[in-house]
Image: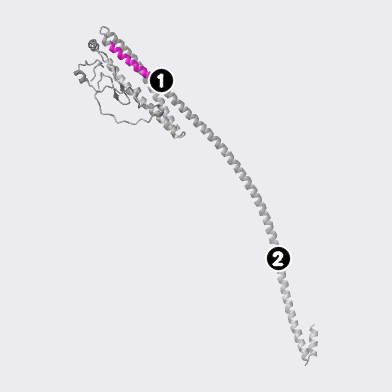
Amino acid sequence: MLLSFSTLELFANGNPFTLRLLADIEDLGKKLAGEREAFKALQVQLSASRAHADQLSTEKASLEEQLREALRERAELTNRGSLHREYEDELTRSELANDANASSEISQQMRDEFADAMEKVRTTTKLKNSLEEEMAQLKNEVVELQREVTSLRLNEANANLLVSEAKQKIDLYNELELDWQKKQLSMSEKIEELSEELEQAKARTQSEEVDALRKELAFTHSIIADQRRKEAALLEKIAALNSLPAEAITADAHRLSFGHREEKPRMYCDICEEFDQHETEDCPKQVSEEEAQPVTKKTPPPPREYCDYCEGKMFVRSRVRLNSSGYVPGVMNPLIVT
């Protein structure tokens, strides 16, 4: 090519056409050289692009492998999570079943304990009724003793013998009283046991049932307090009987033999604390054990006059007034009414 170009230069001396042709050929050569350089550059760039494409393809394959591995791990984790949830569900169901069984056992135990407590309360109520019947019998015996003392006043000749018999019966009453005190002590111990059981059952039973037991216990305490008060009155009467001398009984029997008649004892209510209205057992204020209210503390009334020789509830007279009315000290005389 160079030889041809030099040869053309030799023949082109002075020929304008040839010079122009040479210029064109030179331009074409430059363009061709530039295009070759550009082609080489494109080849280099293509090689670099191919290398980059190969690198990207390798990275893609690696990423696809990592993706497949991640999917396998995800599937495995999902399977493990499902198994774990199934295990937790099974464990929860087992715990719920155990809790239900334990709760059922506790409820049955609470019902058994409450039934035992109610049975003990019923037993104590029966015992209380039995003691009340015995106390009524004791009252009847005291009334009988009073009648016998009255008959002693009407029989002067047999006064000493009848007094001796009355004292023997009083001794029998004392023995019965000791037996009553023992039974009362046993009843108090049972009431304390019931109180402890009620305290233990307070957290396991309903509040209404506990209130009912408390009311019944308060009613039992009120009955015991009333029995103790009556017992004190009976002991005072017994002391008065024991202190009676034979001469006083003889003198009183003398006086009774002259036309005096025995008057019927006055009616008295222990609940209302009133005379001549009604007896205690007929009081309208009485309530059943189910309707009994807790006993409230009452303010004690002012002291009243009291006579040791009269019935314990007759507070309207004193020894001085009895003496001024002709009453003989030391002798029970229910016929004098002021």
* Image: magenta residue range: 133-151
Residue occupying image coordinates x 51% and y 31%: 109
Q: Considering only vertical position in the picture, is 1 above or below 63?
A: below
Can residue 227 be seen from the camera position used here? no
Of the residues shown, which amino acid type is indicated by label 1? Ser
Disc marking residue 84: none
Q: Which residue occupies the extreme bottom position in the image?
A: 14
Across and down, in percent, residue 97 comes to 57, 37
Residue nearest the observer in this picture, 241 or 63:
241
Residue 11 can be seen in this image:
yes
Gap in angstroms between the C-alphas marked 1 and 2: 112 Å
Task: Say which quadrant the N terminus sits in.
Answer: bottom right
Prevailing secondary structure class for the magenta stretch in the rendered image: helix
Residue shown at 69%/63% (left/top)? Answer: 56
Q: Which amino acid does label 2 sit on?
A: Ala
State which quadrant residue 249 falls in: top left
- Badge 1 crowding class, 10 Å Cα cut-off, few under 14, some 14 to 19, many 20 or more, is few
Can you identify the residue that label 2 sits on? 53
Q: Which residue occupies the foreground of this view, 81 or 217?
A: 217
Residue at label 1? 130
Residue shown at the point (73%, 74%) measured from the top left:
40
> Position of 186 compared to 273: left or right?
right
Picture layout, residue 80 above or below residue 32: above
